[in-house]
Image (cartoon, grey):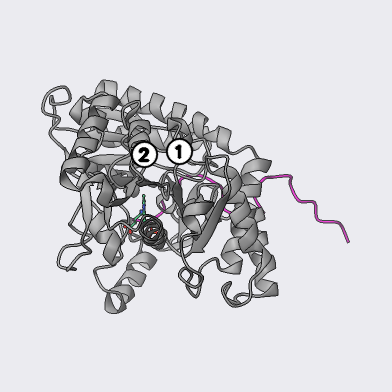
Amino acid sequence: MTDTVLADTSTAPSEPPRERRIVTAIPGPKSQELHARRLKVVPPGVHSVLPVYIESAHDAILRDVDGNQFIDLGAGIGVTTVGHTQGPVVEAAKDQLDKFLHTLFTITPYESYVRVAELLAEHTPGDFEKRSVLVNSGAEAVENGVKIARKYTGRRAVAVLEHAYHGRTNLTMAMNFKAAPYATGFGPLAGDVFHAPSSYPFHDGLSGAEAAARTISYLEKHVGASDLAALVVEPIQGEGGFMVPAEGYLPALQEWASANGVVFIADEIQSGMGRTGAYFASEHFGLVPDLLLSAKGIAGGLPLAAVTGRAEIMDAAQPGGLGGTFGGNPVAAAASVAVFDLIERDGLLANAARIEKRLKAGLSAIAERFDIIGDIRGIGAMVAIELVQPGTASTTKAPNAAAVGALAAYAAENGVLILTAGTYGNVLRFLPSLAITDEQIDDALGVLADGFAAL
Ligand code: PLZ
């Protein structure tokens, strides 16, 4: 008998190579079969951007049931930020699976919930006492943030920004800028939600101070600070198209909010948990939100979300006023603790700057060849391009959604998953996991460049 000698590779022997590989038409025959089954039992309201059915995923690669492999530039919309199926995260979840799956924290509590709250207190901006409530989804975090702000202030109104996205529940539908597809026909919507003008440097050309004056004037005239419970902002808007506000804009809003007793809430559901190279994007702007909402990336793929904030605000909610059956599920909480540990252990935050540099350099090179790229923007592993009609980049900046659709389709057919965004559907966004390699980025951008050439 001879010993089996395993090669020293970073991939397990059964794992496919971590590269793009297309072996069938997209979607392949097995995906098509699954899709036909799905159409009989899942309503069209639940739409899939790319109906290839996934069999496994690791790091930045998705493998479908037909054996096609995609470079994943979407990370499940910013969820698998540390990479798909990272060992320590999977192990932590598996360990917890053997212990208990559920008790309901509001019946009999457990440590991992407390640990997640400690980690959130440590890694969110602000050197003061904080509390966290854990829930299941981003929208639920938004709902709770608003609820807590209303209780604390005794005020009714909520302000959000143009181009915002906050979820699919009744209140959050009203908070989204885009009615279609999120709210169309689903009303009546929640009242007392006000959409204020935002900062969108590519389009408005305003300085941060000018844009903030516009936002504040709108709120003072249209709502009145004394009726405003909360101002909810995404430091970098996600679904809206990764707009980085002009310098000074967000700090001016925060200053106005705190001078007027308005709870300043940062929705960091998409921009948070390392995506921009800081734990939370608020840090890039010097923001110290009163309440910070997190979800998506905080548990590496398991459903978990949180409202974290100043103790005196969070403590305004009466005992029993916050919670929910599955909020802070023990498996999700265990995975979340592992995600925080992994970010520290591997210094993952530093990857965001590498990814930004690589993506922006590649995209700039493409922009030199094709004049429909009007803007390249973003921070860290949160980068986007806004596409305009030929020759309008410095004039009308007329949106080019058709090109975005064609490019995303071309990329998918060639093994690169790129998500779209933007109020006018004319943004391609790149939000890969922090585990993506330079080679994978270059390969994906090569495909994208071919897509531009094919337009
Ligand atoms: N706030 C900033 O990005 C979720 C939406 C996907 P949930 N964005 C992805 C879709 O089409 O439903 C999001 C966000 C910001 C809130 C949310 C809502 O988070 O976990 O999807 O409820």
Question: Looking at the image, is 108 positioned above or below residue 245?
Answer: below
Residue 33 relative to residue 302: left or right: left
Q: Which residue is mark 2?
A: 236
Q: Position of residue 299 (x, y in %)?
A: 54, 56
**Residue type of the residue flagged with mark 1:** Ala
Question: Which is nearer the eye, 213 or 169?
Answer: 213
Q: Secondary structure beneath disc 1? A: helix
Point out the quarter of the image occupied by ligand 1. bottom left
Residue 386 relative to residue 416: left or right: left
For marks 1 and 2, give the CA distance.
7 Å
Q: Position of residue 129 (x, y in %)?
A: 58, 48
Q: Quadrant of the C terminus?
A: top left
How would you classify the magenta stretch by its main secondary structure?
loop
Residue 43 relative to residue 332: left or right: left
Residue drawn at (59%, 56%) of the image: 117
Q: Are marks 1 and 2 in contact (CB under 8 Å)?
A: yes
Q: Position of residue 452 (x, y in %)?
A: 25, 33
Q: Residues within 10 Å of mark 1 (few under 14, many from 20)?
A: many
Q: Which residues are drawn in magenta? A: 1-25
Question: Which is nearer the eye, 314 or 375?
Answer: 314
Magenta run includes residue 6: yes
Q: Residues within 10 Å of mark 2 (few under 14, many from 20)?
A: many
Magenta run includes residue 336: no
Q: Is residue 79 visible?
A: no
Q: Position of residue 301 (x, y in %)?
A: 51, 58
**Residue type of the residue flagged with mark 2:** Ile
Q: Is residue 108 visible?
A: yes
Residue drawn at (27%, 48%) of the image: 226
Question: Which is nearer the eye, 344 or 407?
Answer: 344
Q: Which residue is mark 1?
A: 281
